[in-house]
Amino acid sequence: MTNSPLLDISNLQVEFKLKNGVVRAVDNVSFQVDRGEFLAIVGESGCGKSVTALSIMKLLPKRVAEIKSDYVKFDGQDLTNFSETEMRKIRGCRMSMIFQEPMTSLNPVLTIGDQLTEPLITHLEMNAEEATKRAVELLNMVGIPEPQKRLSQYPHQFSGGMRQRVMIAIGLACEPDLIIADEPTTALDVTIQAQILELLKDICSRMGVAVIMITHNLGVVAAYADKVNVMYAARIVEKGKASEIFASPSHPYTIGLLRSVPRMDKKRGGRLATIDGLPPNLMAPPSGCRFQPRCPMSTDACSEVPFLSNRKGSSKHSVACFYSEDALKKGSSIYVSDKEIFEPINVKKQAPLLSVRSLKQHFGVSFRSGWLSSISGTVKAVDDVSFDVYPGETVGLVGESGCGKTSVGRAILHLNLPTGGQLEFNSKDLNESSIALVRQDMQVIFQDPFSSLNPRMTIGEILEEPLKVHNIVTETDARFERVGQLLTKVGLYAYMRDRYPHELSGGQRQRVGIARALCMEPKLIICDEPVSALDVSVQAQIINLLEDLQRELGIAYLFIAHDLAVVKHISHKVIVMYLGKIMEIGDGETIYQEPKHPYTKALLDAAPIPDPKIERNRKKIILKGELPSPLNPPRGCVFSSRCNLATDDCKEIIPKLINFSKDQSVACIKVEEVN
Amino acid sequence: MRSIIRSAAIVAIACMASTSAVAGSHSSCPEQGGTLKYGVKAEPPNYDMHGTNSYAIMHFVAQHYSTLLTFDWENFPKLEGDIAKSWEMADDGLSYTFKLHENVKFHDGTPLTSADVKASYERIAFPPEGVLSQRKALYGSLESVETPDDYTVVFKLNSPDAFMMDGFASPFNAIFSAKDLEKDMNWHKKNVNGTGPYKFVEHVKGESYIAERYEDFHHGDNCLDRTEGYRIKNLVEPLVGGQIMAEWRATAPPEVKSLTEQMGDDYTNQAKTLMTLWVVSLNSETEAFKDVRVRQALNLCIDRHGGLPKLAKITFTAPRPSGYLLYDTKYALPDDELYQLVGFGPDAEANRAKAKELLKEAGYEGLKFTYSNRAVAHPYDHIAIWLMSEWKKCGLNPEMITNPTSKFVTIRKEGGFDATIDWAPSFLPDPTLMHFKYLSRDVNPSNYSRATDRELDALFDAQKGEVDFEKRKAIVHEFEKKALEQAYVLPVTYTDRVVSLHKSVKGYVIANSHILNNTFRGIYLED
Amino acid sequence: MLAYTLRRILLVIPTLLAVAVLVFFVLRVVPGDIVEIKLAAEGGIISAEEIQKEKERLGLDDPIMVQFYKYMIGLPRGDLGISLWTENNVTDEIVSRIGLSLELAILSTIMAIIIAFPLGTISALYRGSFIDYVIRIITIGGIAVPSFWFGMLLIMLILATFGNLPPLGTVSIFDDPKTNLYQMIWPALSVGYRYSSVVARMLRSSILEVLSEDYIRTARAKGVFERIVIVKHGMRNALLPTVTVIGLEFAFLLGGLVVTESVFNLNGIGKLFVDSVVRNDMNLLQGLVLTVATGFVLVNLIIDLLYAALDPRIRYQK
């Protein structure tokens, strides 16, 4: 019995009966998980990975979801015909699940203790005292300090990372055989993500718990997974050992996916390989190979359905493609027209386009501390930040959420009036009164394109509006023409002018956002997390588009993002921020190759690289703890509370940015000492 | 003069005759006992019979008190003694002498004497500062009240007053105890102590009013153990549901219909014309209504003979055309004389033609005017709709403005209307009450037509001072004709009063006013 | 929690003060004259002089600011002046009637809750089923049908069923609970129908919303009994918006009471309200408005505190 797989699924099929049709969200999926094994299911959103997980637990709403399969064997028992009562006994006891959103996955009105002891009391029939004792152990295990005290607290008193630790504790409470983790770290910062995943991996391997991890992050897969299932449009297109998949990806989709992701560990190369188009609508999927419409290698043969078959010489690695060997051989070249990434024209020879000096953005906040008394404090969202952006250059701004990177962008745009410092744009002083004059030259792209587009206006109207308002193009016909050109330029079609925002996909909407910024012919675009809401393949398309536009039009970007790899890929210069201050600034390549600041190092260590060979041999420093309260930042160096190099000096001295070379400045006294 | 003495004497004798049958005997009660539950739609502000004008005080409080005289309800308006054993008017009409029953006791056990009558009437006629006497104006001719002995009261007048005799029977003129008034002239606002058939037990404001039989009642015809009055909104459901057995004010025709249907044999009612006249007051300060021709035209347009019978079917108005005085009462203008007057003739077409002619002469063809209505369905809306259509038939353009009571009252008082619905309630069929409404505004602020006519004032004073019936009647007729011709106030119709009763309620006799006969004397319950 | 409570209680005072000032002046803008209504409206033989005297006696002739001053200095002592109609203390007039209205309000709230909770829950758990449609029709009726009409319908129903109506004249619940309940249950039902419909619909939609929340999925994934998932995890969260609606509807109750008390001849403040409006008894009216406002504010306070008790996010708010 012990040799048989823990979970064995054969021909799993899930159909949703919706008002306007039937969606087969999972189609003939078969896979196995052994005891203690770490399986990753990867794919873009809507490919059926979450549904697969939920259908194993039978947690899909029965009203709309119909699950069929040959069998779903769990520890030898076929769950297919298990009643709800029998399933309930398995859930949370032998098989548990961790969800994506730690903010909403815990019940806000029940204490952590209550929620944590619930499975213990239900399944293990512990009494309250035993359960509490066990709960304290569990919280200890997942690294929550003062567990006794924390048990009586409510979810809102926990940070996102802490909540996810609690979720893990709940999942592990009854020492299950299998944990299914559905994008457990997607909503978290990269440093917290690293903490959580290390914790999960560590505990599971110690306890011999098998893990099914659902993720879109190939870095995470590379770092932790033993086996990988790649899903596309409800089907598994490739599966096998992680090492094999990363070393010899054989499905064109897998190849595309891997190549779409910018790599931190490689030099800035050419354009990202992008997979054209979008994943299919599962209501009416293409016949035959579902990847065929987007596949550069597709032939007529692809109108037949390719079944998963083992690659020659491997019993574990199987691919659903007629041309897998060919694809493997050609690798990423099946996609690329590798254009060089260009260096900014005449960098530093001329005056900077945007010059930021000692920018400060302080917010006064007050909150009640007692009755009738209140504490007021200052949040230094941006504190003494200086940098330049040259024409045609991309400056990347990275840091964890709350580090002040978005505030920098808003202060430059004067969306919040800066509380200190000087700004110069095009050699002209930028202040409250002059900002209107340069608005046309300085545009912005937001993270969420949907909420920044008026849902009641067509795309054409949205793009025409600024042209009309600023009298850039006065004639109606000319405007019509111009909108067409803009749409074409951002990779859309002119006929899309009549569509409304909700009729477009996320990527298309972001293209509209870019087109809207472009229509003013700006010199600088501030991009605030422009790709973080998008799937990897679409993300790559947008990044390529931004780069192409820069090459063509010479636009400078201030690129604000939390994804280190994306920033690295696109930026000439990178700024690392922490609690409103610049920790390190310099040439992108230099910073990524030789990070000097301990925070930069920690950030880079925390971000997994999508290559198991490299990833598993990295020596990592996992940053401990969480971002301190911005209201009460550590004295001295703001990073001192989490820094592994920190000494007493660091708590006293506020480090200044010191130039280490022409291309690199660091604010750290320890680094100073070393040099 | 002679006739009034004669009638007084007859009454006196009749009264003497009946006294033997009274006093403590239960012979007038076919059945004794039980609780009478009745409903009242309003509530008095206090218990002061002298200072209140609401009918609700009659329905709740009248049962506790006695008056000098009252009426023989079967032969209304024949007078009958209440606490008075006999009475006499002097030949010159300047003094009235009453002999009182000697066995009358207040509810607190003290005997009633002439001093109590004197104190009560002085409070009514000469209220001291801080006391409100609602009908003080009616007793302007009273000079003094004298008490030669404990059971004799003499009223001295400064001039003869034809109203005075009936006035002694006014249900409002309750006899209070002098001892109570000594405590506080307003003691009776919040306390009750009378000599009437039922004793006060409890008043839950807004809800119920409880009284019980007064054992020592001097007439002995209080046949019930207990009376319970309840504040109600509608009368149909409480009657049908057995919550109440009677409502004394009025039942509208549709309600009668629905009660008959739902209660069947359990339902009875009594009907009589009520002495409340619905009128339309024309604001004679407006340019158009300064012209008598326009006022007459408005009157001529109302087809009383054709319309009133129809109106009476849907609301509680009387079907018979009427002047200011209630038809068939002794001072009223006979119909044939009334029908001669402008606007009262039976030929509607001729009237309308005449109206148009008058309007044309006056230059007010197609006159636009506002008609202020009170936001109460019965009978206001019904009357308003009828009048509107009548006036439109003459080519007039009335515009109806309906307001809730308090705003309506304000508009009426302040003259913010062209025409307004209005009413002239009387509790006795006496010209002094029935014609008072039409006196000049400075004499009577309740003449909302705002007219001033000294001739009418003079005629009114003349009839008031004339105690000879025939002479008084002649003056009254002159007033009636002149006032109707002047048409400051247009009489529309009297009211038909229907009192609904559960069949077990016996011994009740309906009167011409809901103010009258509310002491529950003679009422008994039959299984 | 204590600070929160105290803060909320302190806020009550300025709110009521504002109401007091507002109601005084608003009522004096409305036309109408109680003395006219009292002495002359129904006809009657009275001189202008008498009317004037009466006005002076009642203090209606004072300049408005003098009246306002008298009113304002009375307030802190709980002295709301005298009713211009009965000349009794306004406070006494209100106190003598408020018990009944409170009983009616509480009864109908209890009734609403008793009816709404099973209806709302069943409706949500069997969404789209026949029973759900039946419940939704019943509850939409409660919202659509005016309560006076429903009250009259009830009276006809009682008449048709029992042949008579409950006796008039309120019997105290402490003296004779059976009769009292027989008298009060019908008006409570008449008010409670709308009330329960609103609450049931709110409960239904909040249960449905809560059941699609992530933490419900978490609870299910823990293998917790479905009953516990719904009651412990679902209901408590669904209660939050429902409690708000119960509180808000409690305010609407007054409107319902005005009508219902009249229809059922109940002697509560609703009927007193109608009476004082008809009589233009401004003193009583402003007392009533203040009373109702106080009630409203108190109910809101209770709801807020209840909310805090149910929702730790509010309880621990710094």
Image (tube, coloured by chain):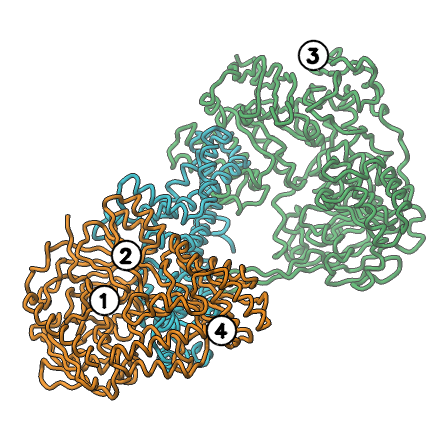
Residue A234 lies, with reference to residue A216, above or below; the image says: above
Q: Colour of chain B?
A: orange
Instruction: Using the image, determine if residue C205 lies above or below residue A19.
Output: below
Image x and y of residue C220, in percent? 50, 30
Residue at left offset 19%, top offset 80%: B2
Task: Find residue B87 and report its horizontal and vertical position in percent.
Answer: 14, 78
Q: Which mark is residue B271?
A: 2
Residue labelled with disc 4: B283
Residue B199 picture quarter:
bottom left
Residue type, mark 1 in image: Val
Residue under disc 3 on the same chain as residue under disc 4: no
Label 1 sits on a secondary structure element that is helix
Q: Is residue C305 left or right of residue B144?
A: right
CA gap between label 4 and label 2 equals: 34 Å
Which tint is chain C? cyan
Which disc is residue A315 wearing? 3
Residue at 45 percent of width and 72 percent of height: B487
Residue A260 coordinates in the image, percent (x, y): 79, 31
Q: Which residue in the structure is indicated by mark 1?
A: B61
Q: Quadrant of residue A206?
A: top right
Compared across the picture, whether B215 is left or right of B169 comes to left
Q: Do the numbered discs 2 and 3 sit on residues whose CB atoms are within 8 Å?
A: no
The disc numbered 2 marks a residue on which chain?
B
| Label 4, residues with CA under 10 Å away: few <14, some 14-19, many ≥20 | many
Tag 3's secondary structure?
Answer: loop
